[in-house]
Amino acid sequence: MNVAVAKTGKGRAVSDLFTSAEGRLPGSPAVTAVRREAFETYERLGLPHRRLEEWKYTDLRALVGEVLPLAASPDAATLKRAADAVKVHAIDGARKLVLVDGVFAADLSDVKALVAEAGFKTLRETLDKDAGLLKTASIDAMIALNAAMATDGVVLSIADGAKLSAPIQIIHIATAASASAFTRSQVAVGKGARATIVETFVAAGAKAYQVNDAVLVSVGDDSDVAHIRLMDDAPDAVNVTSQFVTIGANVKFNFFNMTTGAAVSRLQGFIALAGEGSELSANGVNLLKKTEHGDTTLVVDHAVPNCVSREIFRAVVDDRGHSVFQGRIIVRPDAQKTDGKMMTRALLLSDEAEADNKPELEIFADDVSCGHGATAGALDDSLLFYLKARGLPEKQAQALLIQAFVGEAIEQIADDGLREHVIGVAERWLERRQ
Amino acid sequence: MPAVQETVERVKRIDVDQYRYGFETLIESDKAPKGLSEETVKFISQKKNEPDWMLQWRLEAYRRWLTMTEPTWARVDYPKIDFQDLYYYAAPKPKKTVTSLDEIDPEILKTYEKLGIPLREVAMLEGVEPKVGEEDPAKRKIAVDAVFDSVSVATTFKAELKKAGVIFMPISEAIREHPELVQKYLGSVVPTSDNFYATLNSAVFSDGSFVYVPPGVRCPMELSTYFRINERNTGQFERTLIIADKGSYVSYLEGCTAPQRDENQLHAAVVELVAHDDAEIKYSTVQNWYPGNSEGKGGIYNFVTKRGDCRGNHSKISWTQVETGSAITWKYPSCILRGDNSRGEFYSIAISNGFQQVDSGTKMIHLGKNTSSRIISKGIAAGKSQNTYRGLVTAHRKATGARNFTACDSLLIGDKCGAHTVPYIEAKNSSATFEHEATTSKISEDVLFYCIQRGLSQEEAVGLVVNGFVKDVLQQLPMEFAVEAQKLISISLEGSVG
Amino acid sequence: MHHLNKLDTKMALLEVKDLKVRVEEREILHGLTLTVNEGEIHAIMGPNGSGKSTLSHVIAGKPGYEVTDGQILFKGEDLLEMEPNERAAKGVFLAFQYPVEIPGVATMNFLRTALNAQRKARGEDEYSTPDFLKKVREVSKSLNIPQDMLKRGVNVGFSGGEKKRNEVLQMALFEPSLCILDEMDSGLDIDALRIAADGVNALRSPKRSMVVITHYQRLLNYIVPDVVHVMSKGRVVKSGGKELALELEASGYAQFEDAA
């Protein structure tokens, strides 16, 4: 359905989406003007479709069709449900920041402990002073829609030299059925700092909801930052997240995303290496079943010389699941001595499963060493047989091999505790499969 | 480092102006009026004495074309083409049926002599060392169909081929002489609605080669077509159709050149291959259209649709291409692996220099059971060129046991060029096994110094290393083409030696 | 400096005079002087980092080195003015410490291309294919190099010993007047070393000089030098006869580190 044609019934509904929500969208008149402009961009482009190269494998017009109305602000009952969900998904020792249906829930969050180490405000509080938070260079329709509709988010600033003693976990909880939540957050890490950010997307009883999230991350020189994302949404949800990361000089940035739910999901990460001597490790896992469609799109942009990037991606697809990995390494004309490698592998567990891989190299500098590899296939029969001959039942033998397969990506998480946590999430997915 | 700089400097100077085939032949020609309309299509069809079904086929394509827009997804950049500012038909005059080479305009013969194309049946190949176990090339024969602008001017060895039952003739003749074959196969691999340029070609193609190899026949010699664009402001739209019937084999070679001109010229060919059960087609191209001058002015727009249909079980189609010419190349020789156990291969060398833009690759579409494909692509970018490999490998639901191996390597010479790799890998069933690897790097300075210490000049060293880099693909070419291609590669990269 | 009377009447082939060389901003050779006469074998010994390999690279013309002062004369001509390939054609041959691999370029093709490039540069006729093949066969046989090795890509998949034998093969084929052997013994076991050294010894001739660069004395048991130089910190600090190598073996380089 082409929502760009505003005259149609659906186009009308989309316009209503904005006008009916407008009263609830925070910000001064200046902010509202930015939102309006963004919404016009979205209306002009409509939902992304397969004829757009970037969305070739994730046709939101076909898969999603329409954007649901804004979720109501959480009330006491929904906050109670959210609190139960937080207990299940919180990482031990992490400082929690909880967003319920797109609105920051202070009572469920560890603001006091956090502000001792880092600056924190909500998007709502920050917007009037900085409408720039709604702006990005991208002309992607979903990002424009996010700018128009974002109700809240977290704005973190980690000072120069600060070494956070615990991870910060941003938990997105959906409680409202058949409604949309739009969040936008910013994480600014100063120079010589150390921080770990975890983002978790889960449902608390909600069904058929839609999430559109955007995160803007900047990392100062000489910092060491880990960013772990777990997209573990309800099986009938839609989650489109856009992530912009700008990395300074001599930084170590460790990025990981795992998708284990949602009917339709897409993580689109745009990571720019903007300072020399930095090392990026960007990895991901898609674990998909039923008719789930999971898309991980990573654009790694080497804008300056002497950086290293490594990407490892694994997809495990069962039933009629559909995994998409698009990885692009860009090496700009001046980015000499770039070392960029990417390896993507897909494991198909069913005859109706599908895995599409598009690992791209876009190289404008000559003194580089870049490469990618991609494989797709089934589990190795001889390995399966070996395990079965040792007494393991089929599913268990498969589970063991799958764990090893996704382990190659999960292993890249530097923090022991977080790695164990992610392995736990993957194991639960495998158990559900059995 | 000095050597790096020097290499870059030398290669920068690589003069695309040095194009050796840039001469023009002065002959009179018979042209259709400028521009494209139903009248143009009718004019062409009439010139060719075509039956009505062919005219209707063309008109349908033309009407379809009017509704289409130019594709924009390729990584190439060029000003909008005014399709009304082109001639769609140019034939050397006088136009009459040619029965022997002696009747061909001596100017044209001279042109082919300059190009080194052995139109004379006695022409032998020189200076090639036979490999052990191979027959002496001096004794090997190549049948040639020469296409001048849009019209086939000579087909050699016709009689000998006829004895074997092989039909090798201009497609314009085949339309008249073998209508049942043409009607059955034309457009069956690349439908008239396929894409903007293929549809345009279907409306206005003027000639090209037709090959039919009957069941069980191994074509006794290599078949070859040499394309030459001569006229100004002329689009060249050839159409090639090759059918290998059950259990047959044919190897087909194609070469292309054009005069040096300031304006861009459009070349929009369509090649269709059909391989029936147990048949094999080997299709090799050495594309050396004029690439434009060192400022990026002029050159051929090479927008070509090439597709092979492995229609039968155990059939095989192998594409090998050496692309060194053209201002812009937009070309994806593909295989539809329809028959069970069929196999597709794509071997490519794409060299870009000056301001050339290449967006080329392949599609391997696995439909049958136990089909396999192999892609070896070597891209070399120098000067200010942009060189993109774009390739699709897809295995459909029912294509159980599909296998693909892809290796795609790019080499950069200088820091003003770009090398890009855009693979699309789509696995739609669990028994498909795909392996893909790609690398991009520059020529190692240590390797260059090693060669230079042994007495090679900088350019010779670059030529040697590049030829080593592309060796896997060169080996796929028939020997005489391999030698030509090797020289061509050195010429495209060396420029002014000394 | 040690003076060798018996060599006074010989022609100087290579004269390195007060050579100063920098890599990036660091000076590696601080005024090195060395004369090699026709037919002589000189060993250059020294600890790691003394500048031995730099010297060999500068003589051959490897990019990345900046000569800030001094001169290198070869047969009386200014070597520094020549391109590396011109030096090769004049008769300078560097046997690399780590010979590179050149995928896809058959060794045989490489040998012919290089030999004919050198001959062409000297204004000599290029070898015909049969003559070339004959010559390669002779030489490779004497070096115990199997023919199938020549069909493989240059050094691709060769063992350390095979790579070094390939270097000696080229030396034999190109007939240079100056051979610089850069750490020829590195990565070789004793048998491989003996085979390579025998190959080198077979090439000794009154018209050919050699500069043997090595860290260890062991190589000089096989290739016996006329003159031994000790390098330290970018200079030749001592020269003498072959007995100097044995002396070093016993006492080590430490004494020279201070002297430099």
Image: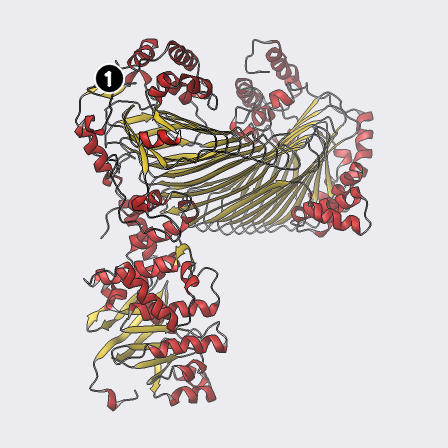
Left or right: where C204 falls relative to A67: left
Residue C95 seen: no
Q: Residues within 10 Å of mark 1 (few under 14, many from 20)?
A: some
Residue B450 in the image: state x and y as whole percent: 36, 61
Q: Nearer the viewer, residue A225 or C159?
A: C159
Q: Which residue is mark 1?
A: B31
Point 24% across, 87% down: residue: C7
Q: Nearer the viewer, residue A244 or A263?
A: A263
Residue A50 against residue B110 in the figure, above or below: above
Residue A110 in the image: state x and y as whole percent: 75, 40
Residue C245 against residue A225 in the figure, above or below: below
Left or right: where B154 falls relative to A294: left
SS assignment at label 1:
strand
Point 30% across, 71% down: residue: C20
Point 28% across, 65% down: residue: C88
Identify the amino acid type marked 1: Lys
Number of dots carrying numbers: 1
Residue C227 against residue A355 in the figure, above or below: below
Residue A173 in the image: state x and y as whole percent: 74, 31
